[in-house]
Image: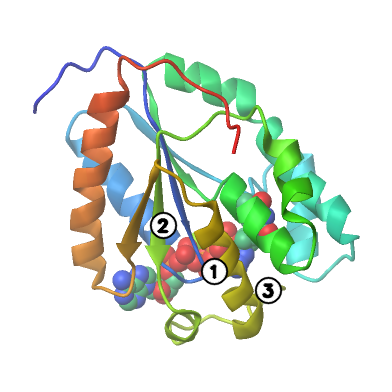
């Protein structure tokens, strides 16, 4: 296994529409990296385990109603409450594989009609990812994967608007992967992207999200 393992960990984020395969691929990537001897953890947002996360969870399950801007700020607060731990893990050499981050925050709220610059503002200063892997799947195709329709955002028209906003957020840290390919093909591509990223990030300073 090439490269030293003494630098900082990498912040690797998976993004994509509902049912694009993020959670499946995060789990596969994590066990691969651990098997290669890298120190790594799987994280997800929303983190439903905190008190803010429980408010978000009730909202997503349609058990509570919240104003659009209020819920946007809760999603952001849910990332802020994990920022210090995230920084110490990364500086301590642990790579984090994160299922959804600020890009979901902006794309979903903007798809409701909120101003995109307003949506970006509360996440300025969170830790910037070293790599964002976007699993690109057509909403119609994702919906065929089953389990669709339970939670608040699982509607095809809405998911199409979310996809447009995701694409408008992509920058040089993004790699767009065809998420409609087989689970194994996608997995293979992610292994290579993640390994390269971890090796390249080891000696780089952490930076803050600035959009
Ligand atoms: N949200 C927000 O509004 N603001 C924010 O700041 C944040 C999030 C962070 C949380 O949902 C919702 O909150 C989310 C964004 C919004 N809403 N939506 N939509 P979540 O985290 O609970 O749900 P999710 O992760 O977005 O969706 P998901 O249903 O968990 O999908 P997934 O993780 O991308 O996919 P998966 O569970 O890995 O796979 C889904 C199914 O497809 C499963 O049966 C797999 O076996 C199958 N699958 C996966 N990959 C393939 C391939 N390659 N081929 C065939 N079948 C596949
Ligand atoms: Mg998921």
In screen coordinates, is 158 left or right of 180? Answer: right
Q: Is residue 52 visible?
A: yes
Mark 2, Cα crowd under 10 Å, few <14 / some 14-19 / many 20+, is: many
Q: In the rendered structure, are the residues bearing label 3 and label 1 in contact, judged by CB atoms less than 8 Å apart?
A: no
In the rendered structure, the answer to whether residue 146 lies left or right of residue 172 reads right
Q: Is residue 149 left or right of residue 147?
A: right
Q: In which quarter of the image is the C terminus?
A: top right
Q: What element carries label 2?
A: strand
N-terminal of the pair, mark 3 or mark 1, is 3
Residue drawn 66% across and 53% down?
106
Viewer can see residue 149: no
Q: Nearer the viewer, mark 2 or mark 3?
A: 2
Distance from label 2 to label 1 (Cα)? 10 Å
Q: Position of residue 105 (x, y in %)?
A: 66, 52
Please tell me how crowded label 3 is: few (under 14), some (14-19), or many (20+) other residues with Cα within 10 Å: few
Would you place residue 157 above or below residue 201 in this image? below
- Residue 119's place in the image compared with 184, above or below, is above
Q: Name the residue under label 2.
A: 134
Who's the residue at 26% across and 26% down the image?
Answer: 200
Q: Does dot 1 land on a helix, a strand or a loop? A: helix
- Where residue 151 appears, as percent x and y from the top left, is 68, 73
Please tell me which of labels 2 and 1 falls first in the chain.
2
**Could you tell me which secondary element the residue under label 3 belongs to?**
loop
Residue picked out by circle 3: 151
Rendered image quadrant of residue 168 = bottom right
Question: What residue occupies the far left of the structure in this picture?
Answer: 1
Q: Which of the marked residues, 2 or 3, is nearer the chain's N terminus?
A: 2
| The quadrant where residue 171 appears | top left
The residue positioned 68% from the left and 37% from the top of the image is 123
């Amino acid at each position: 296994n090439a490269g030293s393992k003494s630098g900082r960990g990498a912040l690797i984020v998976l993004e994509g529409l509902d049912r694009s395969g993020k959670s499946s691929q995060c789990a596969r990537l994590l066990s691969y990296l651990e098997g290669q001897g890298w120190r790594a953890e799987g994280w997800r947002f929303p983190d439903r385990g905190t008190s803010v996360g429980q408010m978000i969870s009730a909202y997503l399950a349609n058990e509570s109603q919240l104003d659009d801007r209020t819920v946007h700020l809760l999603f952001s607060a849910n990332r802020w409450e994990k920022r210090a731990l995230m920084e110490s893990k990364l500086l301590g050499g642990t790579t984090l594989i994160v299922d959804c981050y600020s890009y979901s925050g902006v794309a979903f709220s903007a798809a409701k009609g909120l101003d995109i610059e307003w949506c970006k503002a509360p996440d300025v200063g969170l830790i910037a990812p070293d790599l964002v892997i976007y699993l690109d799947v057509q909403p119609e195709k994702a919906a065929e994967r089953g389990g669709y329709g339970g939670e608040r955002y699982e509607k095809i028209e809405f998911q199409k608007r979310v996809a447009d906003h995701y694409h408008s957020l992509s920058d040089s840290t993004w790699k767009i992967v065809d998420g409609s390919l087989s689970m194994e093909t996608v997995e293979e591509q992610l292994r290579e992207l993640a390994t390269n990223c971890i090796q390249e990030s080891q000696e780089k300073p952490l930076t803050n999200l600035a959009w």
